[in-house]
Image (cartoon, helix red, strand yellow):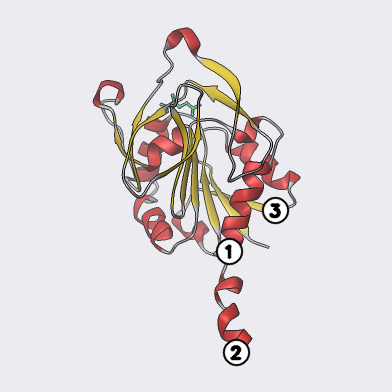
Amino acid sequence: QPVIGVLALQGDFREHLAALARLGVEGREIRLPSELAGISGLIIPGGESTTIGRLIERFGLREPIVEFARSGRPIWGTCAGMIVLAREVDPETRARTQHLLGLLDIVVRRNAFGPQIESFETDLEIPAVGSEPVRAVFIRAPVVAEMGPAVEPLARLTDGTVAAVRQGNLIGTAFHPELTGDDRFHAWFCRLAREHSPAVQLEPATRGA
Ligand code: GLN
């Protein structure tokens, strides 16, 4: 079984840990670089992207998380977490100090639905995750304004706005699957993490023995 790390600097990391617990998957709070050892996948939760980005710098987590991504293990950012993963924030919506990991080749627009529609829910088709629509909760949510060629959209709103993306081992969702009690998105992420767990990577060698 993979152990999934949840970045626990700020935001709704407890809700992600609860979703993992419902699936019977071990989750671990990550605050220090050393805590990334033995983790097969990392979730960066929703919250406030400026705060999370600042704390990543302060706790010396930037390089370790970039290394984690380079190792091929999956990282999933929800809402603020997706912003932190992004290459760029649209200048009009960027905070004065906005530290980004720059791993996902996307440009995001923060608080993209405007103050009138601070939050809303809708059903999204996400074939990667399941055949039944997924309930998606958007809270002061960003949207993906631009995507690089390696980025694949996983979900769109009815007007075509991209609300979830994947770039290899990197996943971003503008919404919050940890808040609905529908844990299929987490189950899918855990499957990705399992594929990258050390036990699985050793399999081809042992099979030949
Ligand atoms: N608006 C927040 C930000 O820009 C994200 C909101 C959320 O994570 N629910 O960081």
Please say if the residues under marks 1 and 2 sit with CB atoms less than 8 Å apart. no
Mark 1–mark 3 Cα distance, whole angstroms, equals 15 Å
The residue identified by callout 2 is 208
Q: Amino acid at mark 1?
A: Glu
The one nearer the camera, 11 or 109, is 109
Residue 72 x/y as whole percent: 45, 62
Residue 107 x/y as whole percent: 32, 35
Near mark 1 (Cα within 10 A), the count class, few <14, some 14-19 or many ≥20, is some
Which is nearer the N-term, disc 3 or disc 2?
Answer: 3
Horizontally, residue 203 falls left or right of residue 48, namely right
Q: Secondary structure at mark 2?
A: helix
Task: State ligand 1's quadrant.
Answer: top left
Q: Does residue 136 lie above or below 205 as drawn?
A: above
Please say if the residues under marks 3 and 2 sit with CB atoms less than 8 Å apart. no
The residue identified by callout 1 is 195
Q: Amino acid at mark 2?
A: Gly
Residue 158 x/y as whole percent: 51, 23
Which is nearer the N-term, disc 1 or disc 3?
Answer: 3
The residue identified by callout 3 is 25
Q: Secondary structure at mark 1?
A: helix
Q: Secondary structure at mark 3?
A: loop
Which is nearer the N-term, disc 1 or disc 2?
Answer: 1
Instruction: Between label 1 and label 3, give the one nearer the viewer.
Output: 1
Q: Determine the residue positioned at 56% across, 85% down.
A: 205
Q: Indicate which disc residue 126 carries.
A: none
Where's the N terminus, which quadrant? bottom right
